[in-house]
Amino acid sequence: MLTRRDLLKLGILTGGYSLVDSGSRGRRLLAQDGGFAPSPQLAAFVQPLPMPAGAPKVPAFLPFDCGTGGYIGADTTFHRIVEEEAFVSVHPDLPDTRIWRYRPLDEYGRKVSPWGALGPTFRARAAENCGAGLVVRKRNELPEHHIGFGVPETTTHFHGGHHPAEYDGFPENIHGIGFVPVIKPGQEYDYVFPMRDPGFRHGAPDRTDRGSTLWYHDHLFDFTAANVVRGLCGFYLVFDEKDSDNESDTSSEALRLPSGSFDIPVCIQDRRFGYDGQLLYDPLEHEGFLGDTFLVNGAVQPYLDVQRRKYRFRFLNGSNARFYRIVLAAANGTSLGMTQIATEGGLLAAPIPGIRHFTVGSAERVEVVIDFRDVPSGTRLYFENRLQQDEGRKPGDVLSRGTRLVELRVNGPQVTDPSRVPAVLRPFPKISDEELSHAVRKSFKFERTHGSWAINGQLANLEHALTSSDLNRGEIWHLESGGGWAHPVHIHLEFCRILRRDGRLPPLAERDGMGKKETIVIGDDFGDVDLFVKFRDYTGPYVFHCHNIEHEDMRMMARMDMR
Amino acid sequence: MTEPFRDVRALASMTALRVSAALSGQSGSPYTFPDVGLITDDNRPVRFYTDLVKGRTALINFMFTSCEGFCPITIPHLVETQQLLGPRVGRDIFLYSITLDPVVDAPPVLADYKKKMGVGPGWTFLTASEAVVTRLRRRLGVYSRDPKIDADRTQHSGIVVYGNDSLQRWASISGLYRGEVIVKAVLRVAGPPQSI
């Protein structure tokens, strides 16, 4: 929420805005650093923030199987998408860009038109019981003889999901796992997302372990970075009776967070472009790709018209290696307060009001609510990135002024606002001392070795598991990084509880009892991390890896088997 | 090292913002390498791009004959790779090893090393001036940001760069992997054998 102090500042400082992004210093530094000439300078805030639509429901194409131990029931919804090459406009002054994207089909099998850069936003409901999930049939229609970076073989990871191994987007086809996740052009793959509460198989479904903002992206072994720069990214939102996607919900359980057109996904991606509008990417730079042009939901530095009421913003760092420190800033750079309500591990136990900034590494999500009710009409505010980063290995200095990513144009009178941010969101108990004392202890060191990246000295070889876990048994993982590198570590299948960061109590938003995480930044100034994780319900091979995707592709990944 | 992308810079300097995408063939900007001169282990002068990479699938690593660290591991793994790839090596897949020690590793020294390591046909060892080797290393991503480590050849990067020039598809993999793992990665960019 904006405080009285914020508003006072605003009253003095509102009015006027710059069409030109203020990040030119960053551009110069980047140009020196990499092998590319700077991307064309493009005027900011000349196009609206794209809002990727949902995927239409299509007729069921798999049988109901709840009664026989499966996950598909009467309330399961079915969807179809294709992966395709397309030319899209990321900015009106730039020629159309060749990208790869997910695009939904309608109930008649027709491609939904028009369609933009991001994939459809899936909207799922979490439940204790079988049959409330999603089934997505994906068809790879990428060009078989594609020339340029990117490999047109795909496996899709629904990031943050608690899903069976065969629907988790395992990165490679290997013998003996019982499924073939990587598909070539012309092939299809069905993903079944049960959306059942973790722990159901052991009779202890945990209703507090529900995600909120998930996303999906390609996960092809060795080529994820190139395929994701090419496109192949979308949102996957999870709702339930609390977070019910209805701010006017009359149920006593409903939180009534801002919903519908006041619930805004914000996917931030840095890219590089030639003057022909085409993406530039060097697959032989392994420290981590840094772009000099910022896309939000597929558009270069867009604007968003906002009404004078509360909004929910779901930030996703969809970049390969760049960290962002996001500030809500007035035109003169004054930072304003936001209320954090979620991480990538779902809603917090309670909102954290008055935050002035938050930092997201690759794949991390942070959700905030901002109330524009008392912001004068005509005011321009900005989501600004105030983190310098000139090398892939870690973020640099905090800046006093950064790059404006989105312009928020506050207009009109105050409007009726049925939404709210209750004082309690999704409370959950900390892991008990007893459970911690029985936990299996594991330690993983993420470090560079002779030009590649390793975990415990091992380069990824998905034919073999680096570690195995017994289902429903708690584990404490110690994660550390060597050599001054920062690594956003993503653990598939489960949310984690952060117990200690550098031996100390972690920041509030990721502290056990307040928030949960599945992408955890370690190394450099972020320090080491001790976390608790308990894998449940699904057996088979999964992975954990660095989500600096260039590091991941240089094999900073490990297979972990559930048994 | 902006050399490989001079085409983009040239475009930038000579045209307005709106350029027809047709200028670049709508396939993204060409992915090019410096066409620098090297000498093969049988004493032939070659150009890096024109003679070694153009239209081919190539595996490229850096080594030196007196290396006691990485090379005694990597080179045998590449020998395995060569054997597993079979007759495609020398036909549409080529291996190149470039010395980090050009003063010592003259062509006859490289030729002896090849023989000693059991290297078969289709795999060329190369030397060049230190400046050329450094330039190639930078372009191929085979370097350390730490200048001390980068200057110390005994700590050199053990990665193998591989790619298919026809598809402009490039990647790298550690030479610590056994041949079967390297082959699996390489075949993802090499595709099926060309007209046998």
Image: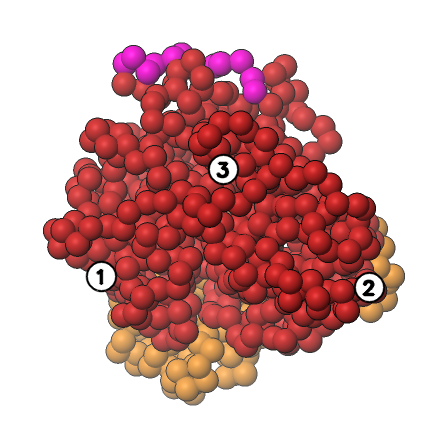
Chain colours: A red, B orange
* Residue that numbered label 3 is attached to: A255
Tell which subunit mark 3 falls on.
Answer: A
The residue closer to the viewer here, A362 or B7, is: A362
**Mark 1–mark 2 CB contact (< 8 Å):** no
**Mark 3–mark 1 CB contact (< 8 Å):** no
- The magenta stretch is A57-68
Tell which subunit mark 1 falls on.
Answer: A
Q: Is residue A324 magenta?
A: no
Quadrant in the rendering for residue A561: top left
Q: Nearer the viewer, mark 1 or mark 2?
A: 2
Q: Residue at x 47, y 14 (%)?
A: A61
Q: Residue at x 54, y 54 (%)?
A: A339
The lab-note entry on whether marks 3 and 2 share a chain reads yes
- Dot 3 or dot 2, earlier in sequence: 2
> What's the distance in space between the residues labelled 3 and 1, CA to CA?
38 Å
Counting from the top left corner in percent of width and height, residue A217 is at 50, 43
Instruction: Check disc 2 and give the amino acid type.
Output: Gly
**Mark 3–mark 2 CB contact (< 8 Å):** no
* Residue that numbered label 2 is attached to: A15
- Dot 1 or dot 2, earlier in sequence: 2
Please say if A21 is above or below A136.
below
Instruction: Check disc 1 and give the amino acid type.
Output: Ser
Q: Is residue A60 magenta?
A: yes
The residue closer to the viewer here, A415 or A460, is: A415
The lab-note entry on whether marks 3 and 1 share a chain reads yes
* Residue that numbered label 1 is attached to: A443
Dominant secondary structure, magenta: loop
Structural crowding at the residue carrying mark 3, measured as other residues with C-alpha within 10 Å and reported as few (<14), some (14–19) or many (≥20): many
Instruction: Kindly tell me whether residue B166 is visible in this rendering.
Output: no
Quadrant in the rendering for residue A502: bottom left
Please say if A240 is above or below A509.
above
Q: Residue at x 49, y 44 (%)?
A: A422
